Amino acid sequence: MDIKSIEAGFTKKEMPVINVGDTVKVLTRIPEGPDKFRLHPFEGVVIAKKGSGLKLNFTVRKVSSGEGVERVFPLYSPVIDRIEIIRFGKVKRAKLYYLREKIGKHATKIESKEEVK
């Protein structure tokens, strides 16, 4: 048995294929009581992916009240309820760290795969 087949047994939930440049909404579970929780959305652009298999992490960046906020999520974390892909992006780089210096629409406008044909 190889590691890939062993890891396949541990991935309980199906996650969408996300790529760098995609705009996603990550819904995380926030506990509010012993048996209650609420879903907290975090919507932004995926600027980096790191790792592989069960250890895959992705970084999402958004601008909130004029301040840039980045959050790193493990893909198969039990805290993540679901991931919704808002818009696909077409980029030519693996890491979009240059978006940290951009402001306004320049930081969020990434060409869509559907538009470029």
Image (cartoon, grey):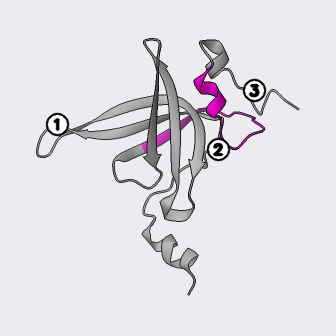
Judging by the rendered image, the residue that carries numbered circle 1 is 32
Judging by the rendered image, the residue that carries numbered circle 3 is 111
Rounded to the nearest whole Å, what is the CA distance between mark 1 and mark 3? Answer: 39 Å
Report the side of 115 relative to 73 (left or right): right
Q: Quadrant of the C terminus?
A: top right
Residue sitting at x 74%, y 29%: 112
Secondary structure, mark 2, is loop
Q: Are marks 3 and 2 in contact (CB under 8 Å)?
A: no
Residue sitting at x 59%, y 12%: 104
Q: Is residue 99 above or below residue 93?
A: above
Viewer-proximal residue among 97 and 1: 97
Q: Quadrant of the N terminus?
A: bottom right
Q: Amino acid at mark 2?
A: Asn
Q: Residues within 10 Å of mark 3 (few under 14, many from 20)?
A: some
Spot occupied by residue 88 in the image (x, y as percentages of width and height): 67, 34
Rounded to the nearest whole Å, what is the CA distance between mark 3 and mark 2? Answer: 13 Å
Point out the frontmost of discs 1 and 3.
3
